Image (cartoon, grey):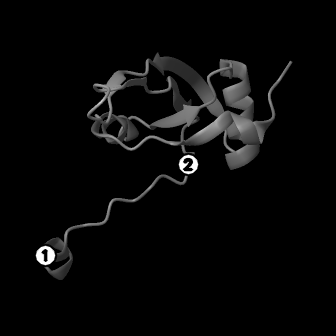
Amino acid sequence: MNMRSDYVIKGSILSEKSYGLLENKVYTLKVDLKATKLDIKAAVKDVFGVDVVDVNTSILRGRVVRKARSKKSGAVEVKLPNIKKAFIRLKDGQELPAPVVAAPADAAAE
């Protein structure tokens, strides 16, 4: 049973690692925890209209965070939600509309 394409992709992940992978044409997306690799491949094709060559996934476990304190009770521990990442390699010559990092103001003036 396939998931709906608009429910699979949650957003893009912006980090140092994801920008480093962009040089190899590997894009990093946040996807639904229940989405399979085939669901992700189909969703990227439907939404962006590109051909996916390879999909790798990893689940980032939510960490436990100590939240606000009160006088009567101590700190409350809260578990953050798990996140599933998909590393997607596209066919040669194709691109996703990746976010563009703005150049610093002095570099633009030169």
At which x and y percent is residue 81?
A: 50, 26
What is the spatial separation of the Cα atoms under label 1 and label 2, in whole angstroms?
A: 28 Å
At which x and y percent is residue 38?
A: 72, 21
Residue at x 73%, y 37% (from the top left corner): 7
Instruction: Note whether 2 is above or below 44 in the view shown.
Output: above
Quarter occupied by the C terminus: bottom left
Left/right placement of residue 3 relative to residue 89 reads: right
* Helix, strand or loop under label 1: helix
Tell me which corner region of the image, top left, top right, bottom left or bottom right, holds residue 17.
top left
Q: Which amino acid does label 1 sit on?
A: Asp
Q: Which mark is residue 96?
A: 2
At which x and y percent is residue 88?
A: 54, 30
* Helix, strand or loop under label 2: loop
1 or 2: tag closer to the N-terminus: 2
Left/right placement of residue 110 relative to residue 65 reads: left
Q: What residue type is labelled 2?
A: Leu
Q: Mark 1 points at which residue?
A: 106
Instruction: Note whether 77 is above or below 69 in the view shown.
Output: above
Left/right placement of residue 89 relative to residue 38 reads: left
